[in-house]
Amino acid sequence: RSPRVTTMAVTAAANRDVDFGDLTEKNIGQLRLLNQQLYPVEYMDRFYRDILNAGELAQYVYYRELLVGAICSRLEPQDDMTFKLYILTLGVLEPYRRLGLGSRMVDYILKVAAEQPDVKEVYLHVQVGNDAAFAFYRKHGFEQAGSVPDYYKKITPTEAIIFRKLVNQGKVANGS
């Protein structure tokens, strides 16, 4: 077998074995533990309280019924009465990467955004030097849209690159 066929077969298997699940008061502790494994920063209690109100914008990802990742996002109102969807976190535990799970989460959140005509952009911050994340988001159609020099306070490098993807362009919200 060629490596490509093997990777495609693994990804196909992952698609059958993947489920999404809601974050609730009863399972929010799992998100805290997951984030401790995934990120070099500590999220404060307010993050976890706020994300409980995110509904479909925050989801766990399960692989063969095992919690292996999560995506957390929020809607941000804009002055022109539209919204941006901000991806706060998106991560998969190391042993479960390269199975297409991150792509499933991005596809999921882009679909959620597309179903809300007033959402015009999906964006996130990526730490400078995280080349794997740069490539991942570019593969999904995100474009580099600037940088924030001192975005991160307790880790280095402190600079973040903003990646964004425009959605719902040219669509007008239906008032009926």
Image (tube, rainbow, N blue to C red):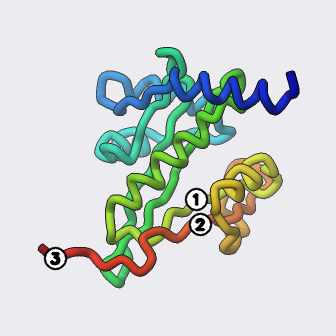
Q: Amino acid at mark 2?
A: Arg
**Front position in the image: 116 or 26:** 116
Tell me where residue 46 appears, x and y as whole percent: 40, 44
Total labels drawn: 3
In percent of the image, x 51 and y 35: which residue is there? 70
* Label 1 vs 3, first from the N-terminus: 1
Q: Which residue is mark 2?
A: 164
Marks 2, 1: nearer the viewer: 2
Give the spatial CA distance, label 1 vs label 3.
30 Å
Disc 2 secondary structure class:
strand
Q: Which residue is mark 3?
A: 175
Disc 3 secondary structure class:
loop
Task: Tell me, for residue 124, which label it has, or none.
Answer: 1
For the view shown, which residue lies furthest in the bottom direction? 80
Residue 10, by quadrant, is: top right
Disc 1 secondary structure class:
strand
Q: Amino acid at mark 3?
A: Gly
